[in-house]
Image (tube, rainbow, N blue to C red):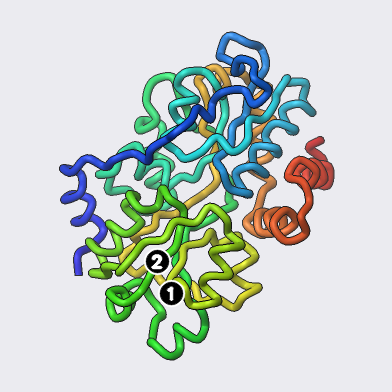
Amino acid sequence: MTTRRTFLALAAVVPVTACGVNNNPMADSSGGASQGSGTSEIVVGSANFTESQVLAELYAQALAAKGVAASTKPSIGSREVYIKGLKDGSVQIVPEYTGNLLAFLDDGNPAQTAEQIETALPAAVGEGLAVLKSSPATDQDVYVVTAETAKTKGIASLADLKKISAQSVLGGPGELKERPYGPPGLEGIYGATFKEFKTYDSPAVKVKDLNDGKIQVATFFTTEAAIGDNGYVMLADPEMMILPQNVIPLVAKAVADNTDAVAALDAVQAALTTEDLTALNKQVDTDHLDAKTVAGDWLKTKGLA
């Protein structure tokens, strides 16, 4: 079995193709120009999944509560798109995750522990950007199977997937297809090559298809209520293909230099827990509450708004 370190060393010489973008998600949805770095308002962007949108609301509302003008630009898209937005000034803050961010920016970096990753990130983000303090809250990418599949096929770990992958379909978000912790890593590290990769934009559809047997393995985030609600088995990752994922704000340098903004964001980071993230996600995905509302309520309970 190839170790993660060996796989990264080999993969580093092969360029990874970025996911295609067919429109301009950085454009203002109202039809006006995007907020740029020359304005006094801080624009907090988010990726196109629930937790990122909730985190963006937490950051923006915490900033506003401390007198820092802020707004949100939700569902920008994948990491390829919103990092470009940070660099061109369309947004000034985006919620991120330590391990995946480092792997994206420096895919050959050997850092594996949470501490090593956080130490490596400031240099990896490059000129004009910065990372603030990480949170104890974590949200890992995780591969799951149904309890029936785990029992009947003997699947408990990513190392077991090679037993079923040739006859199985893997489901996940489109960008996963090219990620080092996606199909390339499953094949290179664990020897699991799937018959097909199926892209899902809707978590609800992915859950239905997994339960109906249309896909046999799927990726989720560990803070998604669907895992516990459906009794899915989360697969162990003995080679640490998926790095530790602490929540961390990725910001424009101007934000890092703004002491009021940093203080507001640091307070959110310190108060946030993994259990909080799970509960907030469930309120949006299961209870169908608005991300802005649940974020505001959480901030009030913590005395941050």
Mark 1 secondary-structure assignment = loop
Q: Quadrant of the C terminus?
A: top right
Q: How many marks?
A: 2
Return the mark for residue 74. Answer: none
Left or right of 71, for residue 162: left
Tell me if residue 222 can be seen: yes
* Residue under numbered circle 2: 170
In the image: residue 63, left or right of residue 133? right
Residue lying furthest bottom: 152
The quadrant where residue 94 appears: top right
**Residue 254 location, x and y as percent?**
54, 17
Q: Tell me how far mark 1 sits from mark 2, CA to CA.
A: 6 Å
Q: What residue sits 75% from the left and 56% below the top?
A: 283
Residue type highlighted by circle 1: Gln
Q: What element carries label 2?
A: strand
Question: Which amino acid, by three-letter code, is at mark 2?
Answer: Leu
**Marks 1,2: beta carbons within 8 A:** yes
Q: In this view, does 236 lie above or below 33?
A: below
